[in-house]
Amino acid sequence: MPPEADNVARIASLIGAAPVAVHGSVRVFGDWFGKPYDNDHHLQSVRADGDTLVLDFDEGERLTVWRPRGLALMDSGGIKLRRADRVRWDFFYYGRPRVDENRYRIEHIVDGPRVSATTTIDWAPVRFRPSLAKPALELLNPVGMPEAEVNPPIVWRLHLASPPKAVFECLATDAGRGRWWAESAVEADGWISWRWPDGTVAQTRVLSVDPPWLYRLGYLGGSTVTFTLADDGHGGTDLALTDEGVAETDWPETHAGWASVLMALKASVDHGIDLRNHDQARSWDQGYVDN
């Protein structure tokens, strides 16, 4: 079985064996189906079809997800897939017979650094604002989960033997970020275009730069990341990282992820070592910390 198909089969098995019934409102790349938490779709079946995941729901709806990666199961019965190449939501016009002429579709397709959305809905205007910074698919339980709810800021500290100027270069330059953070992270006009080994791409905005003491930028999921550097008095650097605005569903994984990222920074700037494996099949989503 190809690696992609094997991964999809594993995701389908985990969803099918979820300890609580899977249900919730659909959000794809940040776009809600209907109003936030206005619908509660109950999963009836899930299966893998090669590199495609198929989820069927109680009122004839179907989610089809191409090359899903990064599954998270929530205690509420929700699920999250961090990445995918394409997501299609098929559904019937509610209150009408379930026949082909009443079937509609919303489809999101990733094309390089962008994601676009189209629909066959013809009874009302639909406005899409998809973002690759948002998870490819979320099924969010509407009970007790307001969209604006966030956890406290993530805070990590790191001591480096290198001076602040060298550390700042690793944060604020294209070449520096490419040595430890992403396969490429090129800035143009205040925006950074990111590319990671697993194929994930994103664009985030640089918010504040004060060399060599502070570097702040928007990041994945719409959070704000701040790096604050201080001279340790012995030629080294005390670094503080703060990630604010991380959604409740993303917080545990993001908290752990930053520890992996910061250790890669230390290895790069202090020792000239790249800890990453640069292997698409051995990413964070597959459980590898040397992603």
Image (tube, helix red, strand yellow):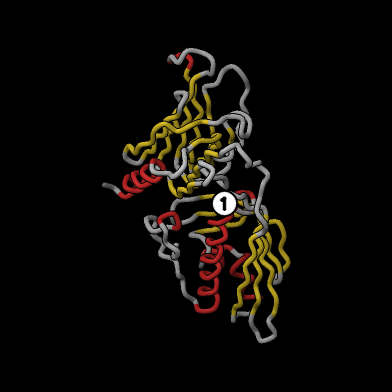
Give the quadrant of residue 210: bottom right
In the picture shown, does residue 73 fall above or below 27? Answer: below
In the picture shown, does residue 186 fall above or below 130? Answer: below
x, y percentage for residue 98? 45, 16
Give the quadrant of residue 224: bottom right
Closer to the camera in the image, 272 or 186: 272
Closer to the camera in the image, 216 or 54: 54
Give the residue drawn at x 51%, y 74%. Answer: 267
Quarter holding the C terminus is: bottom left
Give the residue drawn at x 68%, y 60%. Answer: 216
x, y percentage for residue 265? 54, 70
x, y percentage for residue 46? 38, 36
Closer to the camera in the image, 67 or 9: 9
Question: Which residue has dot 1 on it?
Answer: 250
- Can residue 190 be seen? no
Assign a secondary structure to mark 1.
Answer: loop
In the picture shown, does residue 100 fall above or below 237? Answer: above
Give the residue drawn at x 51%, y 73%. Answer: 268
User: Identity of the amino acid at label 1?
Assistant: Asp
Give the residue drawn at x 71%, y 67%. Answer: 214
Number of residues whose C-alpha sits closer than 10 Å to that of mark 1, classed few (under 14), some (14–19) or many (20 or more):
some
Give the quadrant of residue 175: bottom right
In the picture shown, does residue 224 fall above or below 158? Answer: above
- Can residue 40 be seen? yes
x, y percentage for residue 135? 53, 45
